């Protein structure tokens, strides 16, 4: 009969929890930057100016058709080779990122492409009458976007934004490939050291499952609490 020793997991619980916390940190920062990128791309895509809409559309279509792991490999391995071969050393040192920041950048670029479409749909769902009402009050186009379109759009896209955050959190497991000590990396190292395969991966799976469930519950609660008067 297989004897599973769960005490070894408990003794190393801090390592697992630190890996989980790092994954959450990366996901939160990545989502924040992705939201900024997505908003800019969404407004650019809805612009009447082709010099804005065409590059934004190209960015969305290009990134959405690339695997996130490939983006991470390019940023972590390819970009440094190009930077140190083509840029002054001081500038190259700024461009080249460590594993954690590379993962944040990769998630931001990847998530921004998906959020651009989410935000674009939200912008288009806002009635044109709200914008006309804002302009009739003397608001500029930027003020209409900030004070009228964005609040209404945010309430509309909040469920999709919540799903994107949970997806990005799970995608942080790919950072294992570039040696970022998040939960999956910690689990693989633990397995290599102890050969406790079943216990380690079960513990990691439960941590991911419980965390995503709690995040989903909190975000659904937030969705119910936020009400925009339209």
Image (spheres, rainbow, N blue to C red):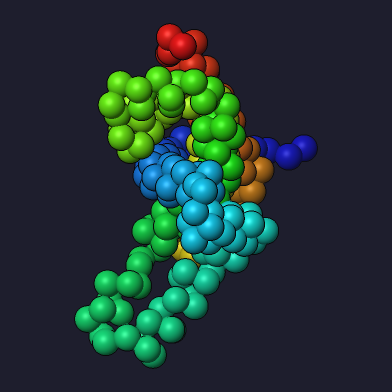
- Image x and y of residue 196, in percent: 60, 48
**Residue 75 vertical position relative to residue 159 in the rendered view, above or below:** below
Q: Is residue 176 visible?
A: no
Q: Is residue 80 left or right of residue 74?
A: left
Q: Residue at 29% of width from left, 29% of height from top? A: 139
Q: Quadrant of residue 94?
A: bottom left
**Residue 22 vertical position relative to residue 206 in the rendered view, above or below:** below
**Residue 4 vertical position relative to residue 56 in the rendered view, above or below:** above
Q: Residue at 43% of width from left, 47% of height from top? A: 40
Q: Is residue 89 left or right of residue 37?
A: left
- Image x and y of residue 52, in percent: 48, 56
Question: Seen from this angle, which residue lies furthest bottom?
Answer: 85
Q: Residue at 64% of width from left, 57% of height from top? A: 61
- Image x and y of residue 216, in percent: 54, 23
- Image x and y of residue 189, in percent: 51, 57
Question: Seen from this angle, which residue lies furthest left?
Answer: 90
**Residue 213 vertical position relative to residue 110 in the rendered view, above or below:** above
Q: Residue at 45% of width from left, 21% of height from top? A: 130
Q: Is residue 150 visible?
A: yes
Viewer-proximal residue, 89 or 214? 89
Name the quarter where the N terminus is drawn.
top right
Viewer-proximal residue, 188 or 48? 48
Viewer-proximal residue, 20 or 102? 102
Viewer-proximal residue, 139 or 64? 139
Q: How many marks?
A: 0
């Amino acid at each position: 009969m297989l004897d599973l020793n769960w005490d070894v997991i408990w003794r190393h619980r801090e390592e697992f929890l630190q890996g989980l916390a790092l994954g959450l940190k990366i996901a939160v920062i990545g989502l924040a930057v992705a939201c900024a990128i997505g908003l800019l791309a969404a407004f650019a895509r809805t612009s009447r100016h082709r010099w804005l809409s065409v590059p934004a559309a190209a960015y969305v279509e290009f990134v959405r058709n690339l695997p996130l792991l490939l983006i991470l490999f390019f940023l972590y391995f390819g970009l440094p080779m190009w930077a140190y071969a083509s840029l002054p050393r001081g500038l190259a040192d700024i461009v080249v990122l460590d594993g954690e920041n590379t993962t944040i950048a990769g998630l931001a670029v990847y998530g921004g492409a998906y959020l651009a479409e989410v935000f674009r749909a939200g912008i288009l769902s806002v009635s044109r009458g709200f914008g006309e009402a804002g302009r009739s009050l003397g608001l500029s186009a930027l003020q209409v976007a900030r004070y009228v379109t964005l609040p209404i759009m945010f309430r509309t896209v909040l469920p999709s934004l919540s799903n994107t955050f949970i997806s990005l959190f799970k995608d942080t497991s790919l950072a294992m490939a570039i040696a970022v000590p998040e939960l999956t990396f910690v689990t693989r190292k633990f397995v290599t050291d102890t050969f406790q395969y079943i216990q380690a991966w079960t513990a990691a799976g439960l941590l991911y499952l419980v965390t995503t469930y709690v995040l989903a519950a909190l975000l659904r609660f937030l969705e119910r609490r936020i009400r925009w008067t339209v």
